[in-house]
Amino acid sequence: MFESSPEGATAYIDADVTAPERILEAAGETLDFGRPVALILSNILGHVGDYDQARSIADRLMDALPSGSYLSVNDGSRGIDPVFEQAQDAYNDSGAVPYNLRTLEEITGFFDGLELIEPGVVPVTQWRPEPGSPTLEVIAEHGGLARKPYSPTGRRSSLLGQPATCRATGCPRGPKCRGRPTLHRDRMT
Ligand SMILES: C[S@@+](CC[C@H](N)C(=O)[O-])C[C@H]1O[C@@H](n2cnc3c(N)ncnc32)[C@H](O)[C@@H]1O
């Protein structure tokens, strides 16, 4: 898997998900950010305890990618299985690297400003099952897939090299804005 071939290049980087700039810098050595990229954040954002920080990481990574790129996120979720939630809480209390289960609304929030692909954010066992496959039970793991829009009202195409905080002149939200065009798209274009 880690060997490049004529069909395409493969690379591995060892980086902290809370340092998206480092990830983008290293990924840019292999990926062409001028062409759509598929970004998969699978069971990783739960390791970022602060929800706003997790949102800003997903935003920052997607901001660096061009329109037509895709974001796939799946994370363990609250609100489905109380026994699982108790087990996760006990695991987190054990001294292990904590993993924070998130609500459906929180996981859906990672796709804010993007075009969610049907069927939206659902338990992963319900996301486009193979026709004719046995019905799988609903599990406490939600996921979705969304495309970065071409519309000028969507997220900006590329902010590579710029900080995740907002630089819009006069933006009343300051760094909390994180450059989210949906909050003040008139200033961000
Ligand atoms: C729940 S596992 C998910 C693994 C895989 N992505 C998947 O979906 O099967 C979480 C992974 O994130 C890694 N991890 C935890 N905190 C991290 C961090 N701050 N930066 C990068 N990786 C981290 C863990 O080492 C582990 O490999």
Image: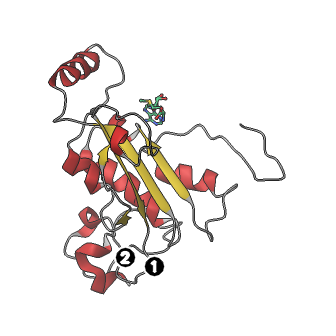
CA distance for labels 2 and 1: 7 Å
Location of residue 57 with respect to 125 vertically, above or below: below
Residue occupying image coordinates x 22% and y 46%: 104
Callout 1: helix, strand or loop? Answer: loop
The answer to whether residue 42 is left or right of residue 113 is right
Q: Which residue is mark 2?
A: 154
- 64 and 119: which is toward the camera: 119
Q: How many marks?
A: 2
Residue drawn at x 29%, y 81% is 185
Q: Can I make out residue 157 in this image?
A: yes
Q: Quadrant of the N terminus?
A: top right
Residue type beneath disc 2: Gly
User: Marks 2 and 1: CB-CB under 8 Å?
Assistant: yes
The residue beneath circle 1 is: 150
Which residue in the rendered view is the most extreme toward the front?
A: 132
**Residue at image coords 30%, 63%:** 112
Which quarter of the figure has residue 58?
Answer: bottom left
Using a 10 Å C-alpha cutoff, classify the residue at mark 2 as few (fewer than 14 neighbours), some (14 to 19) or many (20 or more): some
Going by the image, does 79 lie left or right of 184? Answer: left
